[in-house]
Image: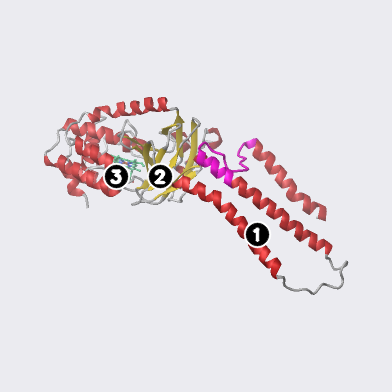
Amino acid sequence: MSMRNWLAAPLLWVVAFAAQAQEKSYAYWNMPKGVTEISRDVYGLHMLIFWVVVVIGVGVFAAFFYSIWAHRRSRNPKPATFHESTTVEIVWTVIPFLILIAMAIPATGTLIKIEDSSDAEMTVKVTGYQWMWGYEYVGEDVSFISRLDRASDRARQVGSGIDPRTVENYLLEVDNRLVIPTDTKVRFLLTSNDVIHSWWVPEFGMKRDAIPGFINEMWARVDEPGVYRGQCTELCGRDHGFMPVVVEAVPPAEFERWLAEQKGESGAAEAAPAAAGTEVAAAEAGTTTDAAVDAGNEAADEAAAAAPLDKAELMTAGEKAYKANCVACHQASGEGMPPAFPSLVGSSVVNGETAQYITQVLNGKNAMPPFGHLSDKEIAGVVTYTRNSWGNESGPVQPGDVAALRQ
Ligand code: HEC
Ligand SMILES: [Cu+2]
């Protein structure tokens, strides 16, 4: 290849890539500006520092190329012999030092803003699971699981024969989106139920690790309604690539309507009187620490264990817990999605020995995650509900039965 070709080849490659990227619209030449003040600050910092680096780069390379050219051997057969210059050394130490300080000042300002989640107007607890997200609107008694949408999930299976390009928002869509209001400071409390995950929405300019046993914080005030997509960004096991984050920001009035609707759905369960007080306390305590959740749950469990609950109450609590925790895999109809997610209709586990069933819910089994974090009443409820729905008729299970099987 001639010299000219050597130079032309990379250039052609860049042009070709650019053209192709443009066409396929996966061209992201820069980070997104985003939809929050913080994300714009972060973008501004990024651009500021980018241009500082460009100016320094141009200056250094200009001096470098000039020196090579002006002091080349053919022009100066006798090299100069000077050595050391304290002045120059001081100058080239002090100038970069000042540049670094100048860059650190705005960066620190932004970092402090990022960390300041005080005065939040609402709080969402985000829990990472292998491999989905749990969202809880703290103090609102609304919570649900958010999983990869069915269309993406079907297409991703080996040998599905489905062209992923035909699936809209392939691997970036979920069944239940996290809905938040715009122009509202929303605080996110992040934790995990199994391994470390990380909750990331690029348009918010933030990501935070969700770590089992810890609660991390972040916040966002979104100013444009829209759907913002992100992903888990901490390698968390086999299906790490299949637990997207989808946030839908809607105007506050619309959010209030949505929230009321969600509560309406679980409204029936709210009517259940026994141990309700302790459960609310547990739910609220859940906003602060895991220990408080456990304490709250225990209080609720004790209250519930004292007297056997009647079947109707277990059924209502169970339906609610089932909808919040199990439908993602086993479907509202109980039919699941065999072969990956078995049907519970007529299942020998559901209708068989209760101890085995309860243990499976507590500890999980293969791809089914453990649900030990649910209260005894919720687990007794969910077991009762599945044993007495969709044609199953196998009788109730009490919270005490669950408590006895916890390790
Ligand atoms: C992430 C998906 C997922 C969720 C959520 C889930 N399961 Fe499962 N479940 C599975 C998988 C996968 C299996 C098969 C496990 C195995 O045997 O390998 C299973 C099996 C079962 C079985 C045994 C069925 C049979 O006949 O083999 C029962 C019962 C069951 N799940 C109940 C529940 C209940 C109750 C909940 C909610 C508290 C729940 N599952 C939540 C994935 C899930
Ligand atoms: Cu993850």
**What crowding class fits label 2: few (fewer than 14 Cα within 10 Å), some (14-19), or many (20 or more)?**
many
Residue 78: x and y in percent read 86, 73
Q: Quadrant of residue 27?
A: top right
Can you tell which mark lies on residue 371?
A: 3
Query: Amino acid type of disc 1?
Result: Ile
Distance in Å between CA atoms under marks 1 and 3: 58 Å
Residue named by callout 1: 95
Query: Residue visible at 59% across and 53% down?
Result: 102
Query: Amino acid type of disc 2?
Result: Trp
Residue 220: x and y in percent read 45, 39
Can you tell which mark lies on residue 85?
A: none
Helix or strand or loop: what does disc 2 sit on?
Answer: loop
Label 3, ligand 1: CB separation under 8 Å: yes
The answer to which of marks 3 and 2 sits earlier in the sequence is 2
Locate the N terminus and report the quarter of the image it occupies. bottom right
Query: Residue visible at 37% across and 47% down?
Result: 191
**Position of 77 relative to 70 (above/below):** below
Magenta region includes residue 40: yes
Residue 239: x and y in percent read 44, 46
Q: Mark 2 and mark 3 in contact (Cβ < 8 Å)?
A: no
Helix or strand or loop: what does disc 1 sit on?
Answer: helix
Label 2, ligand 2: CB separation under 8 Å: yes
Q: Mark 1 and mark 2 in contact (Cβ < 8 Å)?
A: no
Name the mark nearer the viewer: 2 or 1.
1
8 relative position to 36: left or right? right
Query: Amino acid type of disc 3?
Result: Phe
Q: Which one is in front, 359 or 283? A: 283
